[in-house]
Image: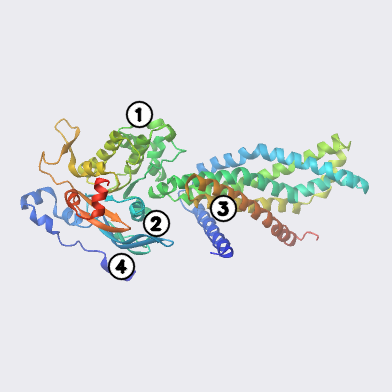
Amino acid sequence: MASTDIEVPQQAPPLPEIDNQVSEDAAESTFAEVDDRERAIPAIEFRDVHLAFDDREVLNGLSFKVMKGETKIILGGSGCGKSTTIKLVLGLLKPDSGQILVDGEDITYYTEVEMMRVRKKIGMIFQEGALFDSLSVYDNVAFRLHEQGVPEEEVEPEVRRMLRFVNLEDAIDKMPIELSGGMRRRVGIARALVGDPKIVMFDEPTAGLDPPTARTICELAMKLRDLEDVSSIFVTHEMNNLHYLSSEYAVVNDAGDVVFEKEGERLCLINTKVLMLRDGQSIFHGTDEALQKAEDPYIQKFLRGH
Amino acid sequence: MNIATRVLLELQETTLLAARAARGLFKRPRYIPETIAQMDAIGVGSLTIIILTGFFTGAVLTLQTYPTLKYYGAQQTTGYLVALSLIRELGPVLSALMVTGRVGSAISAELGSMNVSQQIDAMRALGTDPVRKLVTPRIIALFITLPLLTVVADVVGIFGGWAVAAGLYGMFSDEFFNSVRDGITTDDIVGGIIKPMVFALIIGTIACYKGLNTEGGTVGVGRSTTRSVVTASIVVIIADFFLARALQYILNMPT
């Protein structure tokens, strides 16, 4: 335990290279300096994480960082450890070795009680939504607030605000069983976003959805990234998700509506990186463009499907 | 892993779950509305089957024992025999088995499907301990309602016995109830209430443990439900013997 304490950056680390390259004026006007140092600590960091279920190695020395405000798309075939990675961040599983840091805090050996505090910072969207069948949409979204004993008059506006964010305010009194797959996913997103977590995990949020519904889910992820400054891990194996998230960004137009613009229409940096996993190891990390050019035959096969 | 290791491991895990559930009692938030809802589902919901089981058990006891007692000329003790069997053994054990079948299976299936549809993970991700939210209220509800259900089964059973004795064999009602009153001691009743408390802990813990450890989709839910009912029933019957012996010792019953 002692050795882990040393490696955690207790003091704010030096500013990263990238900030120095931006013109001084821009950097000063965009962030205060304290904010800047804060931002240099990764939201999520994995250091040489190993995990095996019985004899099967699921993660085999995985290391990566998700910076503040960044969306990390994790690609990979089924069973390569994508969902496991997300569960490790939440402490739903514990690694065999290695370290996991959330906001610079080493959570690797946290007990369930200590994890509860960390989980408050993290929103998690499960594959099928994982809504509580016995509770209405309202109670599902309000779950976290009800558990914290927040008075009902504060709960309702928050629940409505979240349901408006996912465009489902009409469904507030329905039961999960009455919802379509896409609606369940969106309620799951609303539930995860209560309390405005700064870190959000998406576990294959578009699996099994029709293309327009999948697109709305991706738009929600882009809104979180570009308008709410949320750091996220987006696990998927669908290439159109990757395309949307790495080529478009959300802005608020003059009329106050959220619109999505293509890369290139305006100067911007889309804060999205791709991490590709294979057999529990990282085989690629970088931008979408670099991924398209990668020569690894497995990556090419994954991208083109043959 | 050989079978002995597996049994020991399950015993350890189940005990740990019970300990965690017990710790949930002393910390906030306390899930009182959940506990009351469970008491309604488990207690009130099981009343019909408990009344039916109790009544016909008492009835068949009289039906079978009266002729034998009459052969020895001891038919006036029928009420005593029926009440004693019910209060000491059949009431607690049959109620526990009925509740295992009805409630234990439901708990395992519910928690099991919540587990395979990731609802348990979602609950943990939202910062709520599923043991305190789901397990503690169920075990507490069983702990409170199973002794009450047992008392209902005992009383209805005695009336069932009386119905057969009076209706079929023409016994006087006074004779039947006097032998009940004279024969039964406070110790019998205390023992008959301690037993279902222990059974409630056994049923609740095993059902929740099997439910929370469900793996392998809907097939897994079926499997864990079956295992929970089978395991809980067997453990209840085995525990009944040792409890009976322990109660004989503690309450200084004549052996």
Q: Which of B24 and B113 is in front in this view?
A: B113
**Separation of residues labelled 3 and 1 (CA atoms):** 40 Å
Whole-percent x, y for residue A159 in the image: 34, 36
User: The residue under label 1 is which amino acid type?
Assistant: Asp
In primary-sequence order, the first of circles 2 and 1 is 2
Per the rendering, the mark at residue A4 is 4
Whole-percent x, y for residue A26 in the image: 8, 49
**Separation of residues labelled 2 and 3 (CA atoms):** 23 Å
* Pointers 2 and 4 within a single chain: yes
- What residue is shown with label 2? A93
Q: Can residue A82 be seen in this view?
A: yes
Left-right relation of A229 to A139: left
**Separation of residues labelled 2 and 4 (CA atoms):** 19 Å
Per the rendering, the mark at residue B205 is 3
Q: What element carries label 2?
A: loop
Q: Is mark 1 on a helix, strand or loop?
A: helix
Q: Which residue is drawn at 40% across and 47% down?
A: B122
Number of labels in the image equals 4
Q: Which of A129 and A208 is in front in this view?
A: A208
In primary-sequence order, the first of circles 4 and 1 is 4
Measured along the vertical axis of the image, is residue B252 above or below residue A72? below
Per the rendering, the mark at residue A170 is 1
In primary-sequence order, the first of circles 2 and 4 is 4
